[in-house]
Amino acid sequence: MKPRSLFCILLVSCTLCQAKARLGNYYFGFAVGRAEYPMAITETVTDSNTTRQVTSMKKLDGVSFEISLNLPISLSSDLHFKLARSDFSHGNHSSHLNEAKLDYLYRFNQVARDSRLFLPFVGLGVQYAELKGSKEKFYANAQTGAEFVLTDSLVFTPRIRYVNSLLDYAINDFEFGASMTWLASKRHALALRYSKSVDAQNYFAGLEYLYSWK
């Protein structure tokens, strides 16, 4: 191997080691973005002299606001809190979604130390969701993902989450998400986020600001 190539590999490895991941750090987050949520809407349709009620699935567009808090509770685990409010509308119809989530995340730090490239994690959580017209409010979830350190200031995090209702076990869904985080400094970061559920077909795409006080 040429000395120049060896030097480049060592330089990249050192850069990855010094990069600061999101997991394992104290931070407060605020996110805003566009949200879409399919919903059954009943509309009045008039045909000639006949008036009837027609129910169909419509995609309601809206805006979503989130605040989050990440707290490391040990050398290998975090607690992650999130509160979210989404407001949707379609024509004369409107709705809202309120959510509260609590996740326990376990980090495989040894893998990160050995690979110097990514930090895998798994997690369990509970969540409360209040949606107009929905009786399902309490859910449990299991998730897995990894933080991939691309440069000393860029971290890519894909994840998959399985969600199941605690009131009706037949109601479940998978959610895929990803974020690209730019670590502007030791305390400030910006992230682009996207998530989409498989069955419900609701999604979120937005921008998140992160502040780390430690």
Image (spheres, rainbow, N blue to C red):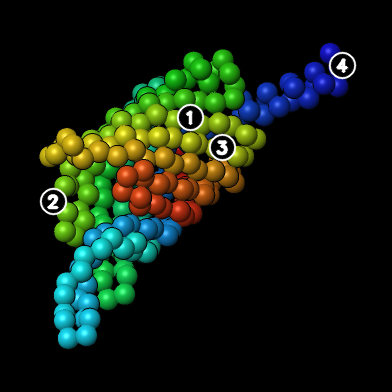
Q: Quadrant of the N terminus?
A: top right
Q: Which mark is residue 59?
A: none
Which kind of residue does numbered mark 4 sit on? Lys
Residue toward you, 121 or 110? 121
Q: Write down the residue under mark 2.
A: 135
Residue 145, position in %: x, y?
Answer: 44, 30
The mark nearer the N terminus, 3 or 4, is 4
Residue 85, position in %: x, y?
Answer: 30, 57
Q: Which mark is residue 155?
A: 3
Asked if the residue at tag 3 contacts the one at tag 1, i.e. Cβ–Cβ closer than 8 Å, the answer is no
How crowded is the residue under tag 3: few (<14 C-alpha within 10 Å), some, or many (20+)?
Answer: many
Q: Write down the residue under mark 1.
A: 146
The mark nearer the N terminus, 1 or 2, is 2
Q: How far apart are the alpha carbons under marks 3 and 2?
A: 38 Å
Q: Write down the residue under mark 4.
A: 2
Mark 1 element type: strand
3 or 2: mark nearer the eye? 2
Q: How far apart are the alpha carbons under marks 1 and 2?
A: 33 Å
Asked if the residue at tag 2 contacts the one at tag 1, i.e. Cβ–Cβ closer than 8 Å, the answer is no
Residue found at the very far bottom of the displayed protein: 49
Horizontal side of residue 9 vs 204, given as left or right: right
User: Does residue 158 sit above or below 12 in this rendering?
Assistant: below
